[in-house]
Image (tube, rainbow, N blue to C red):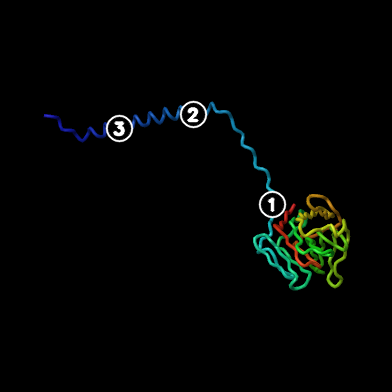
Amino acid sequence: MPKAQGPSDKPEKGARSATIVVAVITILGSIAVAVIAKLPGIELSRPKAATFCDVQSDLHWTVAAGDWTYYGGLVRFGALKGSSGLLIGATELTEGSIESTVKLPKYKEGCKAQLAYSFKPTSEGYFTAGLGGARAAYSMGEYRPGVGWNQLIKRGDGGSLSESQVYKIRLELAGDLATLNINDVKIAQVVREKGASPSVVGIWVEDCEAAEFICTKVCPK
């Protein structure tokens, strides 16, 4: 007659199973350590410091004058409320750069589509740089309320601009200098006021039927 299994037999078998599992884990762990020790050393590269650029979204803009629409990074000026307009952003900048890609549908000579900077709270005046000017392809100027826009420097012939072309405007502000680049080529440079305080940036258009600014961004230094 077979011997009945006592209650003490199960713990004994369980203990033996646990001992075997622990032994297997220990062996596998030792093998893993040995393999890892033989692997060549890997040096992780340090992340480079990121340059912060603030792309001006729809929420950044405030219409100061003119007919503007903006959505998804595209800002479009139309002439329904006159041929001039000013759009003010929300990002402040003392030094750094302002960039935008610009198209001039229905272009006619005399149209000015430019970036605005260095707003003066006391006089509400500002400086501009970009496409067009007084018989110019590119120019930098200053706008003063009650006086209007004064061209400080010009380059090229206004007749050379085309509605079929795309222009990349980059305005660099460093120290007392403001430098205008078009399609990554340095075009002109003017001296800024010394000790310039932080100012918002904007987009200024005059004597244009239409203008488009794509993916405008502000990159503080």
Q: Position of residue 191 (x, y in %)?
A: 87, 56
| Residue marked by disc 3 | 15
> Could you say which quadrant of the image residue 148 lies in?
bottom right
> Label 3 crowding class (10 Å Cα cut-off): few <14, some 14-19, many 20+?
few
Secondary structure at badge 2 equals helix
In percent of width and height, residue 90 lies at 70, 63
Picture disc at residue 52? 1
Q: Locate the N terminus and report the quarter of the image it occupies.
A: top left
| Distance in Å between CA atoms under marks 2 and 3 | 27 Å
Q: Amino acid at mark 1?
A: Phe
Residue at mark 1 to residue at mark 3: CA–CA distance: 61 Å
- Mark sitting on residue 11: none
| Residue at the (74%, 72%) spot, across then down | 80
Circle 2 residues within 10 Å: few <14, some 14–19, many ≥20: few
Please say if 139 is above or below 25.
below
Task: Tell me which residue sits at (65%, 40%) in the image.
Answer: 46
Q: Which residue is located at x 18 percent, y 33 percent?
A: 5
Answer with mark 2 or mark 3, whichever residue precedes in sequence: 3
Q: Which residue is mark 2?
A: 33
Task: Give the mark toward the camera: 2 or 1.
Answer: 1
Tally of numbered tags: 3
